[in-house]
Amino acid sequence: MSLYQATASAPVNIACIKYWGKRDTKLILPTNSSLSVTLDQDHLRSTTTSRADPSFSEDKLWLNGKLDEIKPGGRLWTCISEMKRMRKEVEDQKPNEPKLSAMHVHICSHNNFPTAAGLASSASGFAALVSSLAALYKLPASPSTLSLIARQGSGSACRSLFGGFVAWEMGSSPDGSDSLAVEVAPRDHWPEIHALICVVSDDKKGTSSTSGMQRTVETSALLQHRIKHVVPERMRAISAAIKEKNFDAFARITMQDSNQFHAVALDTDPPIFYMNDVSRAIIALVTEYNRVSVEAGGKLKAAYTYDAGPNAVIYTPQENVKEIVDMVVKYFPQAQPFKDPFGLFKGAGVQGGVVE
Ligand code: DP6
């Protein structure tokens, strides 16, 4: 008897140009393109195993050991159905292939980072899900093609199909066929860049990305300005900065875009606050650190960015990592390293970070 099973894993990605707003909520088509860095260490990954078996009576998925519901028409259901449809196309062309598309699947997914770190896991989770089904079904699909499916699980997940520096091109087709992830540069193009993750709070966020961004689309005039007049130029400029390894430009754009994303959250009715006082204190610290460098005739040395929560991600070239870690520990004395393989800091108030 054959065993049809495959395992794949995918890492978290952190956006420098933020995705915030959908023009189609079912297909998950964004109102603007976005760009991220995929974190490449062994921590901060989702690993997923999928198995197809004729004896299974329904599709099932366990997330971190807990059975999750696969609602018909929901995001998980859509991704699994789309992958089965692609498998069916393979089977139609190669009649000797086993009919896996007709079997139910059991899927087990694990995040190797503590949920307590307060980091979004939907991006790595859906990317790993789609990758494991692609391996199970032996699909001859490129990462960009798979990103079309992962996108329908969670928008930001499409970018985790690639390592390195990744753009999600918003596309213009109503069916979403050109709204996909593309590689801007591989990780080894600019290995000096590191990400330091400062866990400010591990509380579950008050307003989810999905509902928050929808409210922004419905109520924020600033979002319309951002979509039309800001993001297209930023996408061009940050892609050029990455290709030229220009950290000064990369950092400036990353911080501007984080600030504008939180400004559109504030411009939403009712307003959404993702950052807290500690987040703002970290912004002040990075700003001061950069000011000292620039006033001494140097360039920007670090860039902060915040997603839909209070935790900071600081991008910096390797040479500054130690200095920044020391600075965070000095100004946030509660911060201390986690005693676990993730290299996270843990403490009251500010918890330190993962160095990627
Ligand atoms: C602030 O991808 O979680 O992290 O598509 O509704 O699942 P859904 O939203 P999600 O939103 C991520 C928003 C963000 C910015 C980003 O990652 O680009």
Image (cartoon, rainbow, N blue to C red):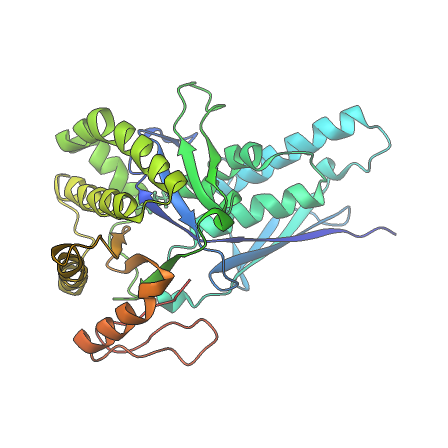
Quick check: 173 above or below 22? above
Is 295 displayed left or right of 46 in the figure?
left
Residue 66 seen in this snapshot: yes
Is 313 displayed left or right of 182 in the figure?
left
Residue 241, quarter of the rendered image: top left
Rendering coords of residue 116 (x, y %): 37, 68
Query: Total label count?
Result: 0
Residue 24, quarter of the rendered image: top left
Q: Nearer the viewer, residue 337 or 126?
A: 337
Report the image quarter containing ligand 1: top left
Rendering coords of residue 224 (x, y %): 19, 27
Quadrant of image for the C terminus: bottom left
Q: Nearer the viewer, residue 313 or 223?
A: 313
- List the single residue furthest toward the front: 297
- Residue at x 42%, y 73% (from the top left corner): 343
Is 349 displayed left or right of 318 in the figure?
left
Q: Nearer the viewer, residue 112 or 55?
A: 112
Quick check: 60 above or below 43? above
- Residue at x 65%, y 35% (from the top left corner): 84
Residue 59 seen in this snapshot: no
Rendering coords of residue 55 (x, y %): 77, 49
Residue 47, quarter of the rendered image: bottom right
Q: Nearer the viewer, residue 219 or 127?
A: 127
Is 226 displayed left or right of 106 in the figure?
left
Quick check: 292 above or below 27? below
Rendering coords of residue 12 (x, y %): 44, 53
